[in-house]
Image: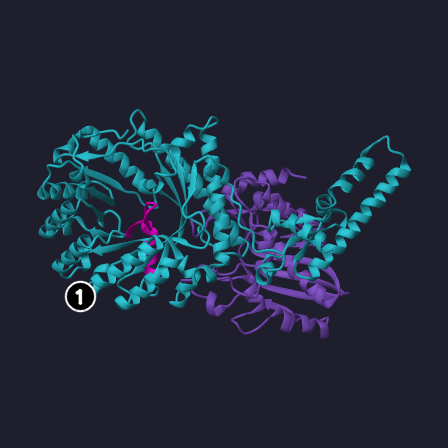
Chain colours: A purple, B cyan
Amino acid sequence: MEIIQETAMECWKEALKLILDKGVDFKDENYRVCREILNLKIVVKKPFFETSKPIKTLFGFNEWKYPQLDEISKIMLTDKLESGYSYSYGARIFNFQGKINQLNDFIIPLLKNTPNSRRAVISLWDPVADSSLSNRENPGLMLIDFKMRREKLNLTAVIRSNDVFFGWPANFYQLFVLQDYVKKALNCDFGNITVFSTSAHIFDDQFKFIEKVLKKD
Amino acid sequence: MADKKQEILDVFRRKPGEEFSTTYIVSRVYSEDFLKLNNILNDKFSDERKKKNAKRGLASLHRKTLYYLNTMVNEDLLKETSIGKKNEKCFTLNLDVLAATSQGFDEPVPVVPIEGYMERGITHRLDETGWVERVNCVLIEGSVVENLNELNKLTAVSMKNVNDVVGINDFEMQINRDTISFLRKLNSRCSDYGRQVCLIIDFTNLVDSNVLFKLVSDVLDLKLNNLTFIFDVQPREFQDNSDFFEKLIKLYQEFGKEIYIKNQGVHKAPYVLGKAGPYTFSEKEWATYKSEVYGRLKGIALGQSTVMVDADSFIKEPNFNSDEFNRLMKKISESFLIINSIQRRKAENYFSGFVRYGSMPKEILFLAKDYIRFWNYGWKRKNLDQEMLIEAIKKAKEAVNNFCIYEETIYKSCGMPVRFKIAFSCAAMEFIKNFFSKPKYMQFYIEDIKDFYKPEVKEILRTKEKIFEIFDGGDLISFYKRSNYNAEDIMREISFILGTYKIPFFRYSFLQKFNETEQTLMRFIQ
């Protein structure tokens, strides 16, 4: 299934409604009732416009405390694995296995030299650490692909397990932060952000809050 | 220019981590001009020329502010985080760079949303000054530590990183002829730092009970009062070692000290008793510890941060109702979230001592949890429906658990896999007597084993069993003795408790022998 909209907020709301209406229920590993759509594609055409609006919507609820924007973006841009976390996106991107900076030493020089390249791919899944039966803490964001077309930088991400209510707003914001980082280095314009969620899901205890979000302007 | 930049930084400093639009920053930094110009623009009687000038004025303020903001972005003090309506830029503070370079100011001291309650004497933080930089309780694994020398080094490190108590599990594995001199040093170190150490003796592993008896006897004799033995037994082991325990009880009686018993048949995880109250793992956490941590790590944090609540004072607040209580629980939970976030970020600095001993900070905090400790919450309170009390605590626990689940889900789905757990427990009187209301509960006197068959005693103990279930961070019940007791009777009572009730942790107090007064079964403390 596919959702194409101008802004992150429009996409988010449409995705939530789609899963709520057409998702299939099952019990996950933690015995939570999960409503899921497989292989959902969401395209945001203006990622730079009101990028953080879905996050700010989540700030408005009293039942939880959503992380601040600074904390969300930092996890994407910090190359050091913070001591309290078992993995972090930034460390996987900027210091994969302590061996390679996938962005500064590969993506940016590659796209500078060969703007039309189809090889500008970052992998966040580390089979050595993550493909283990005992390890249950591994990244949801698996892959980020950059395509420069007509001087616009398009970003596509694959997320293996995507809590669309709590996670998608932050994941999208993090992808935007990364797109902005590369865009500045390449001196080009923003293109689309496309997110493929191989499991796009919500939980039954979120339904009442999702209804509230869908009613918002 | 420096002044203006400082003013802008001050705007961010008030709410670190929050995003602000350019307009908001203009409204704060040029507040008077901004207000004046906006008044002109919104005044329907202003003429067009004036309005035009006001618009120009506002645009000029925006340009000036943007100049400073862009400069500060280039200097890495701020980050441009998004573009809002009308293509307006939004910014956040770059806490990392500020912390690394100390430009502008130190990382702000976290403001937590319970400070009003603290001022009113309803809540109290364990270790006001060090509650971010230290954990409450660390459990060192005596069976994994190589020898007393290593244990000495580990406890020395722990004293600096812990603000309440260090537990040494399976301490029986470290008993030899040098142990008493190690304990003397340890006790003196505890005095220096104001900490406690719990020595947990697991009877399943005990080889020579005579050596243990000699050690306990020496500790009591030398008045090493910062050290507490906790005897962790199966009911069967207690009976099998009855000679030893009888001797031990006599010893504690003689010194007028409390003896601490943990029932391994009811709760497998060890208990640690700090100044603030008890600490323990849930059975599920203990199973995880055994399968994933044991043997690999020498020490692990049990308690991370603690907030204590005086329920009696809170109930007396003029606007008290159940919603207000839920609100308090939520505010405490939010405070823990803020503090835990800083602790994770700075774990390497805060817990550097442990890192030197091969533990990664994330491993130290692997099973740590925050504690809400209740004081004067109504157990054993005359004229208070105990069933209602249990229901109220249960509901509060469910709400706190839900909040923790939401936060773990949120953080995990944002790419920040964190553990966030809050446990309930009781607060120890000795610790909070200077901050909170006077105790309103009864001391529990046992005259002889027949008391356990009295309906009122049965009810008290059944209620306590339920509270032990809800207080997943641990609880404690004290039995006080009259003066005319003998060790044999106490043995029978303890054996009865171990075999009959789901009470994991209790103490027998013989203090009254030194302060004899006429006691009844249930005497109220005034």
Which residue carries the number 1 mark? B177
Q: Compared to B13, does A186 lie above or below? A: below
- Image coordinates of residue A136 in percent, x first then y, are 44, 59
At horizontal 20% and vertical 66% (from top left) the residue drawn is B178
* Quarter of the figure with the C terminus of chain A: top right
- Image coordinates of residue B39 in percent, x first then y, are 79, 35
Horizontal relation, residue B424 to residue B145: left or right: right
Camera-side residue: A160 or B382? B382
- Image coordinates of residue B428 in percent, x first then y, are 32, 42
Total marks placed: 1
Horizontal relation, residue B320 to residue B39: left or right: left
Q: Mark 1 lies on which chain?
A: B
Magenta region includes residue B273 = yes
Q: Compared to A119, does B504 lie above or below? A: above
- The answer to whether any part of residue A114 appears in the image is no
Q: Which amino acid does label 1 sit on?
A: Arg
Judge the density around disc 1: few (<14), some (14-19), many (≥20) Cα neighbours within 10 Å: few
At horizontal 18% and vertical 65% (from top left) the residue drawn is B176
Q: What stretch is highlighted in magenta?
A: B269-293
Horizontal relation, residue B4 to residue B49: left or right: left
Camera-side residue: A27 or B399? B399
Magenta region includes residue B279 = yes
Q: Compared to B444, does B212 lie above or below? A: below
Outermost residue on the top side: it is B383
At horizontal 47% and vertical 32% (from top left) the residue drawn is B324
Outermost residue on the right side: it is B49
**SS assignment at label 1:** loop
- Image coordinates of residue B353 in percent, x first then y, are 40, 64
State which quadrant residue A76 falls in.
bottom right
- The answer to whether any part of residue B133 appears in the image is yes
